[in-house]
Image (tube, rainbow, N blue to C red):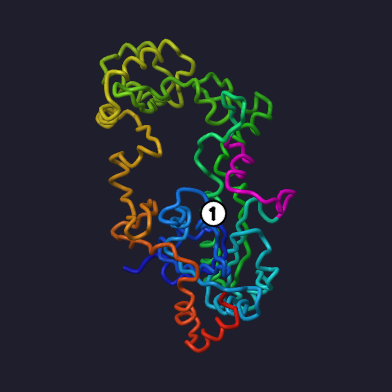
Amino acid sequence: MTQPLAGVRIIECSMLGPGAITTPLADMGAEIIKVEPPAGDYIRRMTWPIVEGVSLMHLHISRGKESITLDLRTPEGAGIFKELVASADAVIEAMRPGGLAKRGLGYDDLKAINPKIVFCTISGYGMTGPYKDMPSHGIAYDTWAGLVKAETDDEGFCYIPEHPSCGIYAGPLYGALGVLAGIIRARETGEGSFLEIAQSDAAASMDWLRSETWRAYERPEDEVTGNPSDNFERRAPGTAGMRDGVRYQFYRTSDDRHVLFMASEQEFWKNFCEAVGRPDLFERWPGSQYGDHAKGNRELQAILRDIFLTKTAAEWLRFGDDHNTPIAAVNTPKTLAEDPQFQDRFPWLPASELGADQLPSPVKFIGEEMPIPTKAPTVGQHTEEILHRVLGYDDERIAALRASGALG
């Protein structure tokens, strides 16, 4: 079956993590031509782990893509780039904004060649604002957005705690969504578009609840209150308000693991109490119909602590399924792959094909099986193939270009 994005061609100029903007599109069949300088994108040597000489970041982010080397400083290299753009749907500038424009390859230049082109620039802080020219790395966008707090060790030194990365990956996802929207409109109207994504903006957007809660709490208390189940008392903003929850909380299990108990609805709470043989708990603390975490009820929390210590984590998951009570698994990045839900839905893309075991796309088309993406390319691996297939160059012309230095 034809892949969902078959027939979509995207020209990508990227350095490091922002190149992830096209990874989900490649997974769904889009043709991604990664244009690299002769020395290549140093993503291949960046961060850890290094798998047989190549970074896992490159193996994952650049999977399914083709690589062509062009020296865009030369007229011939810039000319080849323009020819590629003539038959493309989109161009990705995944680096500091304006890099392509300095080579005469910005949006206005390319739109003159292909009026339907969608041009997307993705960067750390975006094209505007006082931070726009600052050098940065991925964690900066999460610290800027308030997602990662500095911690201090026993010797008094600050350190970066373990944390899930957000902006460096959310930014590309928002960007991919915007690019597809632009392509759909361009194919309908013939009009291209110029869009930009800041990974810092994306980090803040993904964590909208906390910042919007703080903002809402700036209004008078008679306008913005807490939840009715908390007698309208304001909790700490966003997820911080969950710290004192009891019916919505972590509990240790008999096998020294944890589960997440989520009986904040009265119906679920009643199901749980009856199923564990403690209807008296419901009678004493029935709670509100919705959104009741039994905040701060230490007596109840102690009782639940002892109840949850009577079963293993797996037994509690089965219990929740059997008795219609929300109880969730608590995993770590190391243990996640052992989880049966993970094993059912996320079969590893094999190292034998991609150089390292990798997670597949989470997007599933029912009744269809997406092929395994191709391995991330070496620098310029597909240069001659692209010039032959896309532009129709013959061997003689390619040899001349290589001699001129246009291909590096």
Q: Residue at x 32, y 43 (%)?
A: 342
- Residue 134 lies within the magenta run: yes
Foreground of the two, 313 or 326: 313
Q: Position of residue 394 (x, y in %)?
A: 48, 88
> What residue is rendered at 37% in x and 54% in y?
356
Q: How crowded is mark 1: few (under 14 residues within 10 Å), some or many (20 or more)?
A: many
Q: Position of residue 15 (x, y in %)?
A: 57, 59
Q: Is residue 177 visible?
A: no
Q: Where is residue 381 in the image (x, y as percent from the top left)?
A: 46, 71
What count of labels does the image hold?
A: 1
The residue closer to the viewer here, 260 or 80, is 80
Residue annotated with mark 1 = 17
Residue 96 image position (x, y, % from top left): 65, 58
Q: What stretch is highlighted in magenta?
A: 128-148
Q: Which quadrant would the N terminus be assigned to in this image?
A: bottom left
Relative to 101, 50 lies left or right: left
Tell me the kind of residue under disc 1. Gly
Residue 363 vs 381, above or below: the answer is above
